[in-house]
Image: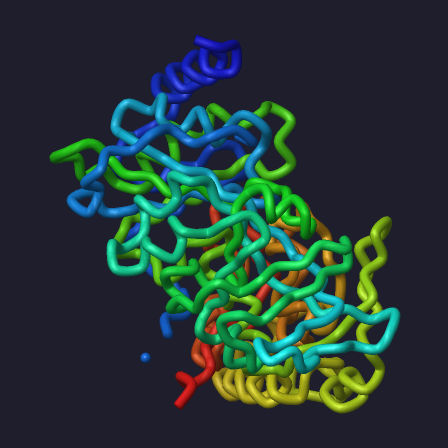
């Protein structure tokens, strides 16, 4: 038993004795463990090494999801199966791969952003064990992935106007040939799926999420599994929290699963090309995109804000509700709505609604990230009714943060 496991088991025992009540929502320091049966506003659309081996008939074992804000620390992924109730697991990487050009199967150039701009592609890298954790009818294409090949999600293929045989060329100099198209849910909402090795070639290197199955007959609360996994985090982890979802409590098995996947944000708000700063993470988005979509306007309660014009309509309506119910005085300050950055260890995900001008911070005072939120119910209800999810329900809460989460209509 390695040192990480021993240390985690000791910490788990101490946590159990002092605070853990199995099956309930538990507070560890400033972090909250979110169970499957907690009310959620989740949008629902109409180790570096090999992962543990799985049995050949995993269809009898539904797939669970685990992720950690900011990414999975080194060594945590392979330790998941030391939790007694977990029988098998696979750890996947996910990052933004920056696309410089795409070519369709006929050889015609499709995407070709002007230098120095690049297109962000939400990509995941998977191990050979990964197919055992997806439905049997979509395993074949994943099992058949070769180095240099990839799979596109159906929505990504529609956005890109690409099909099997297309070539994606990336900032790193590597290219990926599209070997097939899979449904969005089979892809975890990611736009591109590749092998771990190919992922490294295109800049996808950070472990983000774990898929796992529990032992026969087990039906543990998600909060109890999260509590058993929490002690495996390093003591200096920047976001001391674990998110766990039961099989029937998630649409897309991915990191930051409550947020709209990048490809759905693109569909609703329009895809942008950007120049990422590798040091600061700041994004310089192509001026035409910003000029055509980001507008400044005074709205009730909040005053003047700059947001995507589509998001602004919803924020304005939500704040009109707050004003009408007489609770406008409970809103004391407001933060940014449009904040384009691409930071690999951001707890919200590398790219999210903020980058599209579709998120807003309300009542920053008293809602410090990681602390128990104090947001008025009237504000939460009004924002949720207009398509915004609230960060106060996350395991690492951000009580001031509201991000747009309502999915766009299905592609006809």
Residue 60 visible in this rendered orientation of the protein: yes
Q: Is residue 309 left or right of residue 216?
A: right
Q: Residue furthest left?
A: 217
When asked about the image quadrant of residue 132, the answer is top left
10 vs 394: above or below: above
Please tell me which residue lies in front, 176 or 309.
176
Quarter the N terminus occupies = top left
Q: Is residue 27 left or right of residue 317?
A: left
322 vs 156: above or below: below
Quarter the C terminus occupies = bottom left
Q: Residue furthest front?
A: 106
Residue 334 visible in this rendered orientation of the protein: no
Please tell me which residue lies in front, 29 or 70.
70
| Residue at (44% x, 24% y) in the render | 79
265 vs 59: above or below: below
| Residue at (48% x, 62% y) in the render | 151
Please tell me which residue lies in front, 66 or 97.
97
| Residue at (37% x, 15% y) in the render | 13
Spot occupied by residue 404 in the image (x, y as percentages of width and height)? 54, 73
Q: How many marks?
A: 0
| Residue at (55% x, 85% y) in the render | 314
Please tell me which residue lies in front, 163 or 335.
163
Spot occupied by residue 297 in the image (x, y as percentages of width and height)? 74, 89
Q: How is the image coloured?
A: rainbow
Spot occupied by residue 205 in the image (x, y as percentages of width and height)? 64, 43
């Amino acid at each position: 038993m390695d040192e990480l496991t021993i240390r985690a088991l000791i910490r788990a025992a101490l946590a159990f004795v002092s605070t853990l009540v199995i099956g309930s929502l538990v507070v560890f320091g400033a972090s909250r463990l979110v169970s499957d049966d907690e009310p959620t506003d989740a949008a629902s659309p109409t180790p570096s090494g090999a992962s543990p081996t799985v049995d050949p008939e995993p269809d009898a074992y539904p797939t669970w999801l685990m992720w950690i804000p900011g990414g999975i620390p080194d060594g945590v992924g392979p330790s998941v199966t030391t939790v007694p109730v977990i029988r098998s697991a696979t750890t996947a990487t996910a990052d933004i791969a920056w696309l410089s050009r795409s070519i369709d199967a006929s050889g015609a150039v499709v995407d070709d952003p002007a230098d120095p701009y690049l297109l962000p592609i939400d990509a995941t890298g998977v191990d050979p064990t990964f197919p055992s954790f997806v439905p049997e009818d979509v395993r074949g294409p994943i099992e058949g992935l070769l180095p240099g090949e990839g799979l596109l999600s159906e929505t990504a293929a529609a956005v890109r106007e690409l099909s099997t045989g297309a070539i994606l060329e990336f900032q790193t100099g590597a290219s990926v040939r599209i070997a097939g198209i899979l449904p969005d849910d089979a892809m975890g909402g990611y736009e591109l799926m590749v092998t771990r090795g190919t992922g490294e070639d295109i800049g996808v290197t950070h472990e983000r999420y774990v898929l796992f199955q529990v032992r026969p007959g087990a039906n543990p609360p998600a909060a109890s599994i999260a509590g058993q996994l929490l002690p495996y985090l390093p003591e200096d982890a920047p976001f001391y929290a674990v998110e766990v979802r039961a099989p029937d409590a998630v649409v897309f098995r991915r990191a930051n699963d409550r947020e709209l996947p990048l490809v759905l944000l693109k569909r609703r708000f329009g895809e942008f090309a950007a120049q990422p700063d590798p040091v600061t993470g700041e994004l310089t988005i192509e001026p035409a995109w910003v000029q055509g979509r980001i507008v400044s306007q005074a709205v009730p309660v909040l005053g003047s804000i700059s947001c995507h014009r589509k998001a602004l309509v919803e924020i304005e309506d939500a704040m009109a509700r707050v004003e009408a119910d007489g609770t406008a005085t409970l809103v004391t300050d407001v933060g940014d709505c449009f904040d384009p950055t691409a930071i690999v260890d951001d707890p919200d995900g590398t790219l999210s609604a903020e980058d599209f001008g579709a998120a807003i911070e309300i009542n920053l005072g008293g809602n410090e990230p990681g602390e128990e939120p104090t947001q008025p119910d009237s504000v939460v209800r009004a924002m949720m009714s207009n398509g915004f999810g609230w960060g106060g329900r996350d395991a690492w809460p951000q009580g001031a943060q509201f991000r747009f989460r309502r999915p766009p209509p299905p592609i006809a």
